[in-house]
Amino acid sequence: MRVEDLEPDKFVREKVEEISAVVGTDCAINALSGGVDSSTVTMLGHSALGERLKTYFIENGLMREGEAEQVVSLFADLGVKVEVVDAKKQFFDALSGVTDPEEKREAITQTFYRDVFGKLVRESGAQFLLQGTILTDVDETVAGIKRQHNILTQLGIDTEREFGYKLIEPLVQLRKDGVREVAKTLGLPASVYNRAPFPGPALAARVIGEVTPERVAVVRKATVILEDELRDSGAFQCMAILHEDRVTGMREGKRDYGLQIEVRSWESKDARIATPTRLPYDVLERLSERITTEVPGVVSVTYNITNKPPSTMEVV
Ligand code: XMP
């Protein structure tokens, strides 16, 4: 559905009715990351089901600094209880030794859907998982560009048979701009409906090579700096990426064979095409200065100037 054709009030009414009708007197669960898609689904689900929807924040060890605490507190203010599930070990075990991008995505998908949600569904007795898949996720996966972590039904995967629950995807007709309109209508704050997108595989989408707690910690630290420096840039999304190869650097007069961070900042409407932000040179210099001094081991910072396509926005 094009954003021009969207009537947000009507959309909310219809989706709340649809969710109520499909779930009936059963229960559902959903995972909330705090992004605009999962926040919107959480509010739609709670309007439809109230206490019969249980909302979880999955702490997969791949999220940004302080993310769990921020999401729990924001939704508490909106009257929605969010339970944090510590699944760090499961995700890092699944990612151990995996370097191929599609295998990493598959490991994350299986851990989310089979291990974590499968267990939550069994424990809670829920029959349904509500999730915020949007049209762009479907397009790119079906086109074979990238397996988005949340695409299952559209690839012919029967979640009921494989994982023991049915999926409900109320946002699947919309793109990001449409979801933002719906989020606004649902009374979510601007900090949510204007929030830059963040991928389901989280910081793992920004680690080239093996995803270990130590390597994610490097990206997490660089991300804090980047999001701080680019907060007012108006960019659609920005990201710090850890490369696999090391480069020769120098510190305190000695050779330091260290890490490389690539910075990307994107201008885009709906993530289908994108161009790099024309960041002022002094901003780039500040990023380089801060990342090389504040993130241990980093000796090189680069800025990506390639359009999507041929690039994609995330690196994995
Ligand atoms: P790409 O890298 O495909 O990213 O150009 C386009 C937009 O989608 C986000 N992205 C994802 N979102 N699951 C998600 O929920 C994923 O697996 C995924 N991969 C990329 C990305 O951050 C960007 O906004």
Image (tube, grey):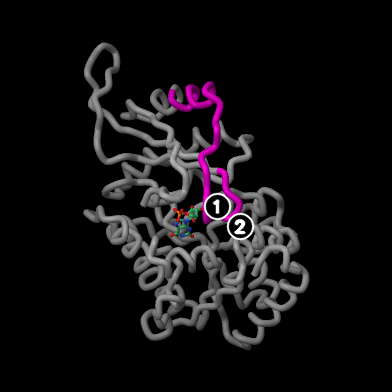
The circle drawn on residue 197 is 1
Give x and y (percent) for residue 85. Answer: 46, 62
Looking at mark 1, is its residue's CB closer than 8 Å to ligand 1? Answer: yes
- Provide the residue designation for mark 2: 36
| Membership of 72 in magenta stretch | no
- Horizontal relation, residue 215 to residue 201: left or right: left
For badge 2, the amino acid type reads Val
Query: Does the CB distance between marks 2 and 1 fall below 8 Å?
Result: yes
Residue name at image x 61 percent, y 78 percent? 52
Looking at mark 2, is its residue's CB closer than 8 Å to ligand 1? Answer: no
Where does the magenta region start and end? 267-288
Give x and y (percent) for residue 301. Answer: 38, 29
- Horizontal relation, residue 144 to residue 95: left or right: right
Residue name at image x 55 percent, y 62 percent? 32
Residue name at image x 61 percent, y 61 percent? 39
Is residue 82 shown above or below 309?
Answer: below
Q: Earlier in the sequence, mark 2 or mark 1?
A: 2
Q: Quadrant of residue 245?
A: top left
Give x and y (percent) for residue 254. Answer: 23, 15
Task: Categorize mark 2 by other alpha carbons within 10 Å: few (<14), some (14-19), many (20+).
Answer: many
Image quadrant occupied by the N terminus: bottom right
